Amino acid sequence: MLTGFPLRNEGDAVPQEFIPKLIALHRKGLFPFERLERHYEFRQINRAIADARCGRTVKPVIHMTEAPAQ
């Protein structure tokens, strides 16, 4: 059922236009690539969740370490 609102499709950017705009924003200090992804050891999972919730990172990456061989 349509409600009269315009339909927008997420993720339909044209890479040839969008990527240069992101680079220009980064060069001006307005797009912090380094905040997009942070790496955490599994033991830091609560910190990773807290960082994502407060905006310190967008994509927390959790590294699972293997148990030492016995």
Image: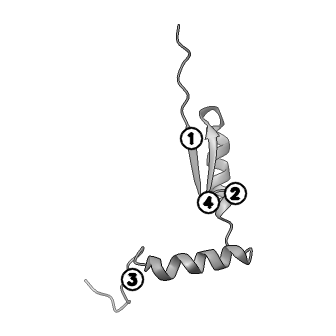
Quickly name the residue at label 3.
Answer: 8
Quickly name the residue at label 4.
Answer: 36
Image quadrant holding the N terminus, namely bottom left
Disc 4 secondary structure class: loop
> Residue at point 49% right, 83% down?
17
Q: Is residue 30 visible?
A: no
Query: Where is residue 14, by image quadrant?
Result: bottom left
> Residue at point 60% right, 58% down?
58
Q: Position of residue 23 (x, y in %)?
A: 62, 75
**Image mark for residue 45:** none
- Whether tag 3 and tag 2 are in contact, CB under 8 A, the answer is no
Disc 2 secondary structure class: loop
| Relative side of 32 to 16, left or right | right
| Relative side of 64 to 38, left or right | left
Graded by Cα atoms within 10 Å as few (under 14), some (14 to 19) or many (20 or more), the crowding at tag 4 reads some
What's under tag 1, amino acid-wise? Answer: Ile
> Between marks 1 and 3, how big is the CA–CA gap?
32 Å
Query: Where is residue 56, by image quadrant?
Result: bottom right
Q: Earlier in the sequence, mark 1 or mark 2?
A: 2
Quickly name the residue at label 2.
Answer: 56
What's under tag 4, amino acid-wise? Answer: Leu
| Relative side of 34 to 2, left or right | right
**Image mark for residue 62:** 1
Disc 1 secondary structure class: strand
Graded by Cα atoms within 10 Å as few (under 14), some (14 to 19) or many (20 or more), the crowding at tag 1 reads some
> Between marks 1 and 2, how big is the CA–CA gap?
15 Å
